[in-house]
Amino acid sequence: MYCKLFESFPEGNLQNRMSPPHPFVIEPPASEASFSPAGGDLSFDLLLFGFANELLPYFVYAFQEMGKRGLGRRIRNGGGRFHLVKVCSETHMVYEPDDGVFRAPEIPELLLTQPVGSPSKGGSAIKVRLDTPLRLKFGNQFAAALPFHVLVRGMLRRISVLNNHFGAGEPALDYRGLVARAEQVEIESSDLRWFDWRRYSNRQEQGMLMGGMIGSVIYRGLLEEFLPLLRYCEIVHVGKATAFGLGKITVPRKEK
């Protein structure tokens, strides 16, 4: 079970087959603080895909055991210990250690919430905010800029692999057409910058750099047909290292 959750490998012997994604995303707290004082609260979101939803009680147990062991560099000195207070879904209380009752949350289907329509007829502008570092490879290199077609390629890969492994199969999307039309979308303004995110690996007992782009970018062009892709990836993240919470994007809703 550990390998199925954390060490995913492609099935079969096809060299070009894409490795299955991790069936979970741990979204870190919105704060950029890397230190939590004793007695403080720490909250985060956990997204589970497909079969991993059936293993939610094991995730809860793992977090409880993690609390006994501790987090961070000082666990050998008894630092970083915590206890689980509660687990909530969007609709109800899932688990509280005091009563020990586990209430299974509702599991939504992993589907595009809207069909991707035909090419837009009118131009518009949208803002995409990168809330956590975004790591996207294009031309076998991590992109230091974010042309719209690079973002769309990353979203299509994410949508395809998630639906293939955890959803209803390959979605019926015009991949080539979407990419071709995305190449016509221009960047109106951008304040993106590279951010070297540091994390500490207890398993490897060393710090690790996992950099990516953060900031925001405004695109202008025929964008309406891409909105379902953007809304989908707002939830499931995009790019590399999504299991660690990287690649979280937000497309702010326009005020009415």
Image (cartoon, helix red, strand yellow):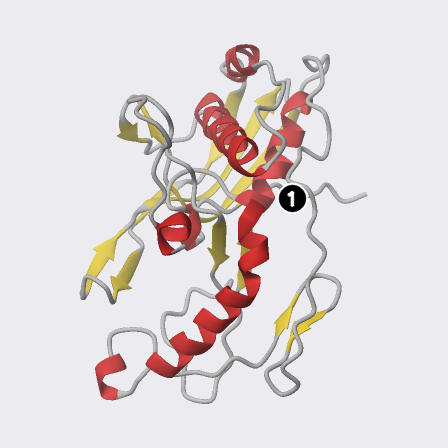
Q: Residue pushed farthest right?
A: 256
Query: Does the rendering let one see residue 49?
Result: no
Residue at 49 percent across and 51 percent down: it is 24
Residue at 39 percent across and 75 percent down: it is 66
- Image check: 85 left or right of 109? left
From the viewer's side, name the closer residue of 107 and 121: 107
Secondary structure at badge 1 equals loop
Total numbered labels placed on residues in the image: 1
From the viewer's side, name the closer residue of 154 and 170: 170
Q: Is residue 155 above or below residue 46?
A: above
Estimate how packed mark 1 is, as few (under 14), some (14 to 19) or many (20 or more) residues with alpha carbons within 10 Å: few
Rendering quarter of residue 119: top right
Q: Is residue 98 above or below residue 215?
A: below
- Image check: 54 left or right of 147? right
Where residue 78 appears, as percent x and y from the top left, is 28, 87
From the viewer's side, name the closer residue of 170 and 126: 170
Q: Quadrant of the N terminus?
A: bottom left
Where residue 216 appears, as percent x and y from the top left, is 49, 41
- Image check: 25 left or right of 12? right
Where residue 143 appears, as percent x and y from the top left, is 33, 31
Residue at 54 percent across and 31 percent down: it is 159
Query: Does the rendering let one see residue 71?
Result: yes
Q: Quadrant of the C terminus?
A: top right
Q: Amino acid at mark 1?
A: Pro
> For mark 1, what is the residue?
252
Rendering quarter of residue 11: top left
From the viewer's side, name the closer residue of 208 and 196: 208
Q: Is residue 97 above or below residue 173?
A: below
Where residue 180 appears, as percent x and y from the top left, is 51, 11
